[in-house]
Amino acid sequence: MSSHWKNVRADFPILHQQVNGKPLVYLDNAATAQKPRAVIDALVRYYERDNSNVHRGLHALSMRATDAYEGARARIAKFIHAADPAEIIFTRGTTESINIVARSFGARLKPGDVILATEMEHHSNLVPWQQAARASGATLRYVPVLGADAEGGLDLAALGTLLTPQVKVFAFTHVSNTLGGINPVAELCARARAAGAVSVIDAAQSIGHGPFDVRAIGADFVAFSGHKMCGPTGIGVLYGRRALLDTLPPDETGGGMVTSVDYEGARWKPAPERFEAGTPHIAGAIGLAAACDYLDGLGREEIARHDNALAALAYEKLSALPGIRLLGPKGARSGLVSFAFAEVHAHDIVTFADEDGLALRGGHHCNQPLMRKLGLTGTTRASFYVYNTAEEIDVLVASLRRILKFFGAS
Ligand SMILES: *Cc1c(COP(=O)(O)O)cnc(C)c1O
């Protein structure tokens, strides 16, 4: 590992505090990640020195802000190996990115068309497609998950019958935020393309946790959030293949996205401006670029190795707890584990673990249909990132033992 890793924890000011008299153990990274000093400094620097509106100004601050904002777009293009910065549209996050595709591409759909999603989608990659189906008369179908604990991942064998010529869009997550499994996105994109469908990847749980190459994957659209990859909240990205983006109508309209307007109508700029009406989150984009620098400094392969190794270790140690039900694949997984006990509700576990300084997440994780299918009301999830350690997994396991004893479940 590179020398950057030596002081990783020192890079994150928030980690150095006590919660309920215990050192904070932050294992809620799948909900949001902490921010390194470099990202916080980039935000402060922008507001202290360069703050101005972008694109329409001719004065020094506006030109600086524009350069920094467009520089951030180019930096993020590089981060995901996009061919062209114009393929990077800044949004509020994964949710808004998927809504834009679902409305804008969805406007093309008609009765008889099929939208294909999977049973493991986050509500953000599910409800917008339900809405698109309702608005267009298209049908929404799902690729099933396999196994009582969804340990078998997606039923890829079912794709043969599901990916008919009627399928116009195939939307799927790269990594499930509840199961931790890693879907074979390059294969899924190739299958979509062969069927004549456009692919949409929800990369919220993957992009900050390892290498990601949109061209090698062959994706048409990719959605992700800044805040899950050490960047600020309120900023995210919709990547779209250039040739596709310029054929789509805008979603929101207003200032900044038009070439000319008269009282009768307006003409749209090409992407990315076409999809960025109004003043964008300039500071957020700059902070997100700083997060890309930070993560590349650590090394994306190294981040994947680190996070996945911690999750594998947690999975192994948690397996020893009486009555535990672990979800998702038994083998290779990304940096999170999700589990349930018949006797103790996930909300109680999270509340009691907080007494031990632990930040966990319990509930349906925006996967209600999947929870229902698996016969669960929710799970407890521990999710790992660059600053987590093997010692923190011991704190987790000890805390769970204490809680199980308290509830008379061990
Ligand atoms: C967090 C998450 C989302 C939603 O991201 P937002 O930042 O809340 O828009 C969507 N999909 C997955 C898999 C997620 O983990």
Image (tube, rainbow, N blue to C red):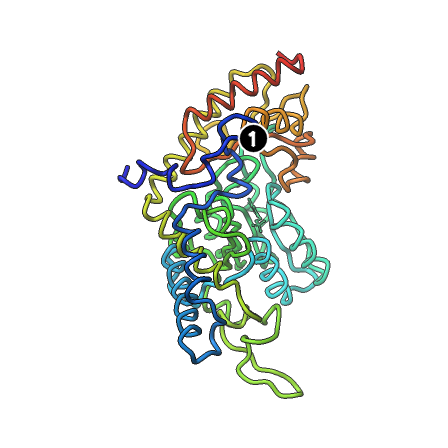
Q: Residue furthest left?
A: 3
Q: Is residue 309 above or below residue 55?
A: above
In terms of image quadrants, where is residue 148?
top right
In terms of image quadrants, where is residue 129?
bottom right
Q: Position of residue 198 (x, y in %)?
A: 53, 59
Q: Which residue is mark 1?
A: 338
The three-letter amino acid code for the residue at tag 1 is Ser
Ligand 1 under 8 Å from disc 1 Cβ = no
Q: Residue at x 35, y 52 (%)?
A: 293
In the image, taking residue 326 as reference, residue 312 lies left or right, namely: left
Q: Which secondary structure, mark 1?
A: strand
Q: Is disc 1 surrounded by few (<14), some (14 to 19) or many (20+) residues within 10 Å?
A: many
**Placement of the N terminus among the 4 image quadrants:** top left
Q: Position of residue 171 (x, y in %)?
A: 56, 52
Q: Nearer the viewer, residue 320 or 330?
A: 320
Q: Residue at x 54, y 75 (%)?
A: 256
Q: Nearer the viewer, residue 215 or 286?
A: 286
Q: Position of residue 396 (x, y in %)?
A: 51, 24
Q: Nearer the viewer, residue 380 or 172?
A: 380
